[in-house]
Amino acid sequence: MQLNRKAVTLIEAIVVIAIIGLLIALLLSAIQAARMAMARASCLNNLKQIGLALHTYHDQNGGLPPRSDQNFQSSNPDTHLSFFALILPQIGETNLWNSSVEACSIERNSYLNPPHIGFATPIKIYSCPSDGRLASAVTLKTGQKAAFTSYIGCMGSLERKVTDKRTPNRLNGLFGSMPGISFDDIKDGLSETIMVGERPPPDSYEAGLWYPSGHILRAPQKGPNEFLGIPSLRTLFDQQCHGVQEKYQEDRLDNPCSRFHFWSLHKGGANWLFADGSVRFMAYGNDDILRALATRDGGEVVESP
């Protein structure tokens, strides 16, 4: 008996190929979405570790870093290193911390390596997994090697008054003041006060160093590095970015002025570390809420989204 076999038509072959292509596209999209979700979760965990280290430092020293207000002629690390560097012992980087203390006794300029090897040493929990650029030291235009961070401390909202008048160098956020702020100074509540947020360095690498203090005068890099306000008034003194509108919104790495506001490489928003140690993902467009959350004693009644 002869069997009649019907050949596949061209149209049927095209339909099959189209279905296979659609399935592959959906699979690749799902894989990409899963990778992005994992990167966001890993980034959130980085901030949790930073928050735990800051709490440990606070418990040991009675306040957030820096613990003293030294003049710039001293060799005290509190003067020359950022809070990221000052919590190195609390994140398990004791050897690098000891090296940094010795470096400060030799050379007060923490931009110089040697002896400041921390300037070019990447710290894994200080970089978001979404930003592969920061896994290793970056070569600057000057030829100098430098290590960067995806995170930056919050110095408060510069649109609101500083209510703490005990010393003239106290801002209304949690960073930027010398000496550092105590949790007792946070009248708005730990769960309603921002401590650290995301801000990837621009491709120009004009900002984002994790090691040197943000208080260093006449630094060879534009910054900001260690802390940032909401909004940042630094653009008033930056000819390149003067007048730039600083909103909490998605930006581009090839925009050098993106360094003046909080944002991330995650889709739709960024992770934020609060003073109680919690980390929350907040969608873009919450500028008014962020300005309220940026202050430690502004007295605002706000419900964070």
Image: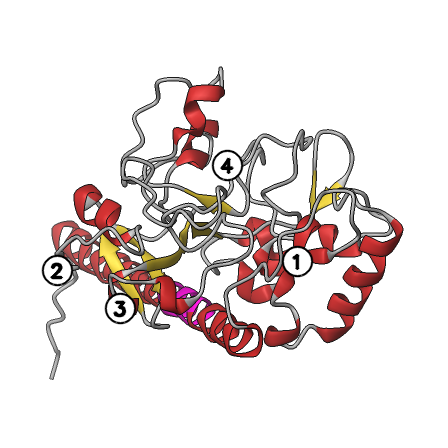
Q: Which residue is mark 2?
A: 303
Label 1 environment density (alpha carbons within 10 Å; few <14, some 14–19, many ≥20): many
Whether residue 285 is visible to the viewer of this picture, yes or no, is no
Where 305 falls versus 223 (above or below)? below
Name the foreground residue: 297 vs 35: 297
**Whole-number angstrom distance, CA of label 4 to CA of label 1:** 17 Å
- What amino acid type is highlighted by mark number 4? Pro
The amino acid at mark 3 is: Ser
Task: Find disc 4 in the rendering and name its residue.
Answer: 202
Task: Judge left or right: residue 45 versus residue 289.
Answer: right
Percent of width and height locating residue 264: 37, 49
Q: Is residue 41 magenta?
A: yes
- As for residue 132 lying within the magenta part, the answer is no
Disc 1 and disc 3 in contact, CB within 8 angstroms: no
Task: Tell me the crowding category of disc 2: few under 14, some 14 to 19, or many 20 or more residues within 10 angstroms, Cα based.
Answer: few
Q: Which residue is mark 1?
A: 122
- Of circles 4 and 3, the one toward us is 3
Which residue is situated farthest in the top direction here? 239
What residue sits right under mark 3 in the picture? 191
Amino acid type of the residue tagged 2 in the rendering: Glu
**Mark 1, secondary structure of its residue:** loop
